Amino acid sequence: MSQNNAPQLGVVLYSFTREYRARKYTFEEIVRKTGALGLGPGFEIVGYQAFRGYPRISDDVALRFRRLLDEVGLVPSLLSANVDIGRRRDRQLTDDETLDLIKLQLDAAVKLGYPAMKIQFGANTNVIRRLAPLAEKAGVKVGPEQHAPHSIEHPTVQAWLELFEELDTPYLGIVPDFGVAARKLHPGMLDAQRALGIKDEAVDLIDETWNRVHNSEDVLAPFEARRQLMKDIAAIDERAMGYAWRAMTLFGHQNPDQWASVMKYVIHVHAKFHHIDENGEDESFDYEHILRVFRENGYTGGYSSEYEGHWWNSEPDAFAELLAQQAVMRRHLGGAPQGTEAATADAAG
């Protein structure tokens, strides 16, 4: 994949989900504050979250969006598309219907100025094969997100890689998510469940199950364990079922070193995190290790900082969290930290 000489940092709109849903900020205010705090230059959107009527985007809306980004010093980095093959009640979408849905979003990416688009594993290899010439014609790189619990060795991901090798086009690749390579469940999430009154037995079982899978070499173990865990938790404390699902779905078990062999297929990266502590670390992800793998194996493309602490913590301001995380990113990638104490204070305010 073609890369620039230095990595491009940025954010994804999803990071501001709590503030956005609470109407603390409008979409335009989020964009403007992102630019003002120097959290770009990349700005990733989730299409259905950003625009009413998406994926159909009017010329006027597209023009105003592109002018807004330009005004505040941001650039389109990645469009997060949705591949919801279960959107019908009676059946899953056919390959033709799935392709049509992606094509509409590919058109939106072109109109909005996005050079790359992320899709989900709901698009099978037959759909991706048929999508390849459309991506080439549009000039937009397209890649399924490699999201936990799918490690690089999972059969679904291996099928993608085999297809990319066969088609040999720079317009197909993958979008790794740091959540694939967690080192442990975030303690803040565990504490939050106990604070909600979830039974200790349920919280302990979830933690024990995750750790057991983490020490397994079976790439299918996370999926099998998740199915059994959901049954067990339902019998202990149904209030913990959402937490059990997120724990086994958002925190993967892959060794970061496994990304080294597929770096040529990486078109963008989701730099997930939950909280940067006083030591400059996210307890769930070894940023030094992960970023060293990308840096030493020649990746110089884009990273979207993706804050997901809002799953359990309503207190932090996403802007302040993102400033702290990007300082960590720049330190490990060899660049000077961006942002100051004043900027952090302004973000929190």
Image (cartoon, rainbow, N blue to C red):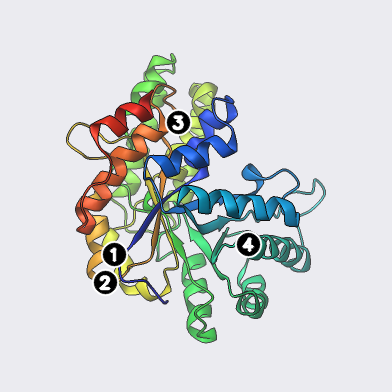
Secondary element type, mark 2: loop
Callout 2 crowding tier (Cα within 10 Å): few <14, some 14–19, many ≥20:
some
Q: Disc 3 marks which amino acid?
A: His
Q: Nearer the viewer, residue 246 or 128?
A: 128
Q: Which residue is mark 3?
A: 310
Q: Is residue 3 above or below residue 282?
A: below
Marks 3 and 4 in Cβ contact (< 8 Å):
no
Q: Disc 1 marks which amino acid?
A: Phe
For residue 111, the mark is none
Q: Disc 2 marks which amino acid?
A: Asn
Secondary element type, mark 3: helix
Q: Is residue 159 above or below residue 75?
A: below
- Identify the residue at horizontal 45%, vertical 31% (top origin): 310
The answer to whether residue 2 is left or right of residue 101 is left
Marks 2 and 1 in Cβ contact (< 8 Å):
yes
- Identify the residue at horizontal 32%, vertical 58% (top origin): 217
- Along the polypeptide, which appears first: circle 3 or circle 1? 1
- Along the polypeptide, which appears first: circle 2 or circle 3? 2
Camera-nearest label, 1 or 4: 4
For residue 297, the mark is 2
Camera-nearest label, 4 or 2: 4
Q: From mark 2 to mark 1, how far is it between C-alphas?
A: 5 Å
Indicate the quadrant containing the C terminus: top left, top right, bottom left or bottom right. Answer: top left
Q: Which residue is mark 1?
A: 294
Marks 2 and 3 in Cβ contact (< 8 Å):
no
Q: Is residue 120 above or below residue 347?
A: below
> In the rendering, at what x and y percent does residue 297 appear?
26, 71
> In the rendering, at what x and y percent does residue 188 appear?
33, 27
Q: From mark 3 to mark 4, how far is it between C-alphas?
A: 27 Å
Q: Which residue is mark 4?
A: 109
- Along the polypeptide, which appears first: circle 3 or circle 4? 4
